[in-house]
Structure formats: C-alpha cells, structure tokens
C-alpha cells in the first residue's frame, strides 16, 4: 500500500518580483488619518428614547464661517424649517455660532435621530455651499450627542444653547446688554425667559414645540432662564 506524503506548509514570498517587500510595517501603510477632520471619536452613540431630549453639537468644517449674518440666517432658518419635524425627529431649539451649531431636539429613537439629523445636515451643507459659492465639506465631523436625563441637566442645556453667544462674548471680556437676545438662535420662540420674552419673529417658525416632560415642564423646577446669565461649560 502506497504511503501518502504529509502536506508541507508553503511560505508566501516576502518580496514581490520587483523587489519590494510585502506586508509588515512600511512607510505609508495602514489606515490614513483624517487629521483635523477627525475631532469626534467613533464611539457607540448614547441610547436615545422618546422621553429624553438631546443636546446636539454640529461643528463646521475649517474654512466655513460667516454664518452669523442676515443672509446666512435666512438660509439656515429655511433649512431648519424644512427639517424641523421629520422621521420622528423634532428640532426644538438652536443657536448658530461662528464655528458650530447647537441644537436641542427630541427623537423617538436612535434611528429617528440619525435620519432626522442626516436630512438636516444635507440641507445645511447644500444651501451653505450655494450661499458661499464653494464646494466640499460644510460639517467637519460627526455630530456630538448628549442625552438629557434630568430636569437640572435639561435646564442647563437650554441655557447653554440659547445663551451660547453671551458665553463666548464673556470669554473675550465683552459684556452684552442685559436685554440682548441672540438674533441667530431660537431665543425669540422660547417661553421660559424669567423677564418675559422678546417679540416673536414674523417668519415661519424654524422649530416645533417640545413634547417631552423634561422640555415642557421638568426643567422649570430649577427656575426660569435669566437672559443675562452666562452658562457654564456644557458638561457642568
């Protein structure tokens, strides 16, 4: 009976025919870094549910600026209006800053938040590029989401969003008038000011009324928001 030959392990050639080495550490190998564009780590999104609003921060790409003016505001307001209530996502408050946009929103679940934000981001990117007569990225990276779970946390997020321009001014040593409201935010539609509220704008509302208990009632347990208060950092 003939013997069967034991199979031998073959080695892959370490060098190609042109002499270059295959595999291993070499210059230029591996995943390419996004550099400044990779500000947000790709971590698991926090759990989103219909009972808890979220604080969303959108960062603008380098080179995108000049959005705090009448022309850009008119464009962004239309973007917000078009995407304010879709796919189970609802935009409740926002403020436009020089390098970022803050939003307070509600979503039925994580999928609703993702679809709503995707639609809103597409609108913003298209119309901002058209306004600035440019092409390319408008939003620098993934948006940051912070789920609001308590009345105190929700109250702080509202103040941080609506009074963000006052906070940036204070960091630069500037003191804004006590009765000043950020015109590039939803401050005119907010009914939780301690000193009443500014006259509501005549344009179509770019937001929808809140439905969650935290945004309608719960946060008020920790007093109404004073127009001239300077909010602390978003994590406090």
Image (cartoon, rainbow, N blue to C red):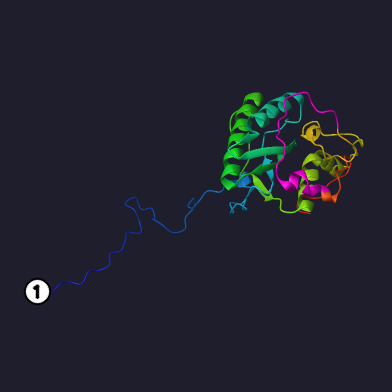
| Residue 213 among magenta residues | yes
Secondary element at tag 1: loop
| Pick the front one: 217 or 68 | 217
**Residue placed at 61% from the left, 31% from the top?**
123
> Looking at the picture, how far across and down is residue 132, in whole percent?
66, 26
| Pick the front one: 188 or 143 | 188
The residue range painted magenta reads 198-220
Report the quarter where the C terminus lies.
Answer: bottom right
Dividing the picture into quadrants, the one containing residue 74 is top right
Q: Main secondary structure of the magenta part?
A: loop
Along the horizontal axis of the image, is 186 left or right of 111?
Answer: right
Dividing the picture into quadrants, the one containing residue 73 is top right
| Pick the front one: 166 or 172 | 166
| Residue 103 among magenta residues | no
Along the horizontal axis of the image, is 28 left or right of 75?
Answer: left
Q: Which residue is mark 1?
A: 2
**Residue placed at 27% from the left, 67% from the top?**
9
Along the horizontal axis of the image, is 37 left or right of 208?
Answer: left
**Residue placed at 63% from the left, 27% from the top?**
127
Residue 61 makes an appearance in the image: no
Report the quarter where the N terminus lies.
Answer: bottom left
> Looking at the picture, how far across and down is residue 34, in whole percent?
58, 46
Along the horizontal axis of the image, is 33 left or right of 228?
Answer: left
Q: Residues within 10 Å of mark 1 (few under 14, many from 20)?
A: few
> Looking at the picture, how far across and down is residue 154, in whole percent?
76, 49
**Residue placed at 67% from the left, 41% from the top?**
58
Which residue of the protein is positioned furthest toward the left in this rendering? 1
């Amino acid at each position: 009976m003939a013997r069967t030959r034991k199979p031998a392990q073959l080695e892959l050639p370490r060098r190609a025919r042109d002499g270059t080495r295959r595999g291993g550490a070499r210059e230029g190998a591996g995943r390419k870094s996004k550099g400044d564009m990779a500000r947000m780590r790709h971590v698991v999104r926090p759990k989103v549910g219909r009972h808890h609003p979220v604080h969303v921060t959108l960062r603008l790409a380098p080179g995108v600026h000049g959005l705090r003016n009448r022309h850009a505001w008119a464009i962004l307001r239309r973007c917000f209006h078009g995407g304010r209530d879709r796919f189970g996502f609802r935009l409740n408050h926002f403020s436009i800053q020089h390098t970022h946009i803050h939003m307070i929103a509600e979503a039925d679940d994580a999928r609703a938040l993702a679809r709503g934000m995707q639609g809103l981001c597409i609108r913003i990117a298209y119309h901002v590029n058209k306004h600035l007569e440019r092409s390319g990225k408008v939003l620098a990276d993934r948006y940051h989401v912070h789920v609001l779970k308590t009345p105190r946390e929700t109250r702080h997020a509202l103040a941080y969003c609506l009074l963000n321009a006052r906070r940036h001014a204070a960091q630069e040593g500037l003191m804004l008038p006590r009765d000043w409201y950020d015109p590039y935010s939803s401050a005119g539609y907010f009914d939780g000011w301690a000193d009443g509220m500014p006259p509501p704008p005549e344009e179509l509302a770019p937001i929808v009324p809140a439905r969650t208990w935290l945004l309608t009632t719960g946060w008020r347990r920790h007093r109404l928001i004073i127009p001239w208060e300077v909010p602390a950092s978003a994590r406090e």
